[in-house]
Amino acid sequence: MQKIFGGKPTAAKKALLLGAGFVVKPTLTLLSEAGVEVTVACRTLESAKQICEAVKNARPISLDVEDESALDTAVEKVDVAISLIPYTYHPLVIKSAIRKKVNVVTTSYISPAIAELEKEIQDAGITVMNEIGLDPGIDHLGAIKIIDEVHKASGKILSFKSFCGGLPAPEASANPLGYKFSWSARGMLLALGNTARFYQDGKIQEVPGPELMSVAEPYETEHRGYAFVAYPNRDSTPFREKYQIPEAQTIIRGTLRYAGFPQVIRCIVDMGFLSQESRDFLQRSSDPLPWKEATAKILNATSSSEQDLIQAIDSKHSFSDTDKKDRTAEKKRIIAGLRWIGLFSDDPITPRSTPLDTLCATLEKKMAYEDGERDLVFLQHRFEIEHADGKRETRTSTLIDYGDPNGYSAMAKLVGIPCGVAVLQVLDGKLGKGKGGLLAPYTPEICDPLRAELEKRGITMKEESVA
């Protein structure tokens, strides 16, 4: 723990840490060990007390960030506010910080709502640092390092691909999706509906959300022990400007999952389970329907027998377009997965009004991490480089990290520790050479000190020339 959290004390500095999620504790511990006095604020005092338990220099409070007066009172007492609550609430925190002239750190992307506050942030003379977790965060630090090195040597970045996956460790991945939930199943499933945009061979390509799983393909990596698939995630096109690589013809940022994930998700989507439409039979009840009857209603099947349910699925979903043998095997695997989830069973649903939320309630029960299980983070950049002498090189930058069953998950550590390091640099006036304003890690002057500090704590991306 000392390797991760040890640091020079920052005397008499105070921070307000907003949030109750799994990344809060590693951030809190790092700041506490550095001598920062941290007020942990949650909606309920009990949640804040649990987070502060056995942590020195930590004080719990109850706070509703939508209560402007209460938020201002908490913010004005500190040197920095750390917003680890849902990103939609960040503007409320930043507006309070502007009023009270207090710095802010978040791990989220700079949203349009935050970008609109840039002039007010500058006028207040404060620093608002964003995008400093894992993805976004560590991914930026690794990318900017190589891009800067190549450009300084008069080289070009012809192609940049970056994929990241937060997954169960292989030994904990035995379920139809090869996935487990440490956060909202709803958030993960809804993210699959976002349109993806990216540069491919100089042209902008766009994949609508409903087609996203159809373009997922095996991800080739030098680490042969993993069977990943990759698909593009959201809009990668702004990174040509953000990373200052106008010469790049291909820029794709995306997500990694284990093989088999896209096919099961495609079937679930086609069955109508991502619908957010309220249905009468999914309302909260003391006598909820069995899953097979709910599935029959969602599919408009003729009955709730498994045979009729499968027939209804056949009418809505096209299985593999490969030869008949492969199609039969894929159908068998996917149907077995739906059976494992319980969609054909007599088990009662946990009604949550919509097909999406009702399914999520079951997934979060059946696919939660069990005691002793580890998670895995795999992040890899792949650069196609043209050097000044015309020679080509393929270079990778890779981070592989497993959670500690007796400590932090890999995801919690790799989001929480970079956030804590950024907070310390804000408090010391070192971040971005103390220029302040609305910041994210897109320049060497911001990235280099952050990366150096993370490396001291054992968090680093390994670079290799592979071709």
Image (cartoon, helix red, strand yellow):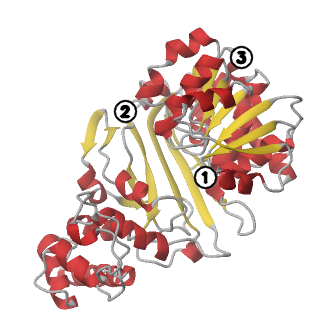
Which type of secondary structure does the marked residue at label 3 adopt? helix
Residue 59 position, x and y percent, is: 78, 44
Is 333 left or right of 462, judged from the image as shown? Answer: left
- Image location (x, y in percent) of residue 424: 77, 32
Sequence-wise first label, 2 or 1 = 1
Q: Secondary structure at mark 1?
A: loop
Mark in front: 3 vs 1: 1
User: Which residue is the site of mark 1?
Assistant: 21
Q: How many marks?
A: 3
The disc at residue 237 is 2
Q: Quadrant of the N terminus?
A: bottom right
Q: Please report whichever mark, 3 or 1, sits nearer to the chain's N-terminal start.
A: 1
User: Which of the two discs, 2 and 1, sits closer to the camera?
Assistant: 1
Within 10 Å of disc 3 (Cα), the crowding (few <14, some 14-19, many 20+) is some
**To which residue does mark 3 refer?**
434
Q: Is residue 48 left or right of residue 133?
A: right
Foreground: 135 or 216?
135
Q: Residue at x 29, y 68 (%)?
A: 283
Q: Residue 47's x, y, as percent?
A: 66, 55
Residue type indicated by callout 1: Gly
Q: Amino acid at mark 3?
A: Gly
